[in-house]
Image (spheres, rainbow, N blue to C red):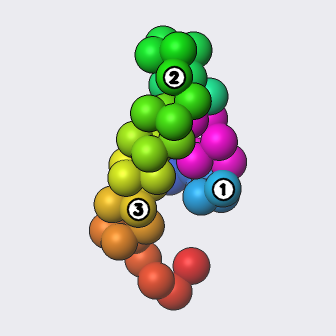
């Protein structure tokens, strides 16, 4: 059985923003997009963690 790996939300946000920054070239767009993606992930997550 496969176990889930816990990734801290702040690390996920940083990696997402960094990858988007490299791909898009715009820091502002990368930050806003990463924040939106991570916010949805936090909302869908387990609040007890």
- The quadrant the C terminus occupies is bottom right
Asked whether the beta carbons under mark 3 and mark 1 sit within 8 Å of each other, the answer is: no
Query: Taking the image as drawn, is residue 3 in sight?
Result: no
Q: Main secondary structure of the magenta part?
A: helix
Mark 3: give few (<14), some (14-19) or many (20+) Cα within 10 Å.
some
Foreground residue among 1 and 31? 31
Q: Report, in whole angstroms, how far the alpha carbon at label 3 lies from the one at label 1.
A: 11 Å
- Residue on which disc 2 sits: 26
10 Å crowding of disc 1: few (<14), some (14-19), many (20+): few
Of circles 1 and 2, which is in front?
2
Q: Is residue 46 above or below residue 27?
A: below
The residue indicated by pointer 1 is: 10
Magenta residues, start to end: 11-17
Residue 12 horizontal/vertical position (percent): 58, 46
Task: Identify the secondary structure beneath mark 2.
Answer: loop
SS at circle 1: helix
């Amino acid at each position: 059985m496969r176990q889930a790996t816990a990734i801290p939300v702040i690390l996920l946000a940083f990696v997402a923003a960094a990858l988007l920054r490299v791909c898009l070239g715009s820091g502002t767009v990368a930050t806003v997009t990463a924040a939106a993606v991570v916010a949805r992930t936090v909302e869908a997550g387990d609040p007890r963690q």
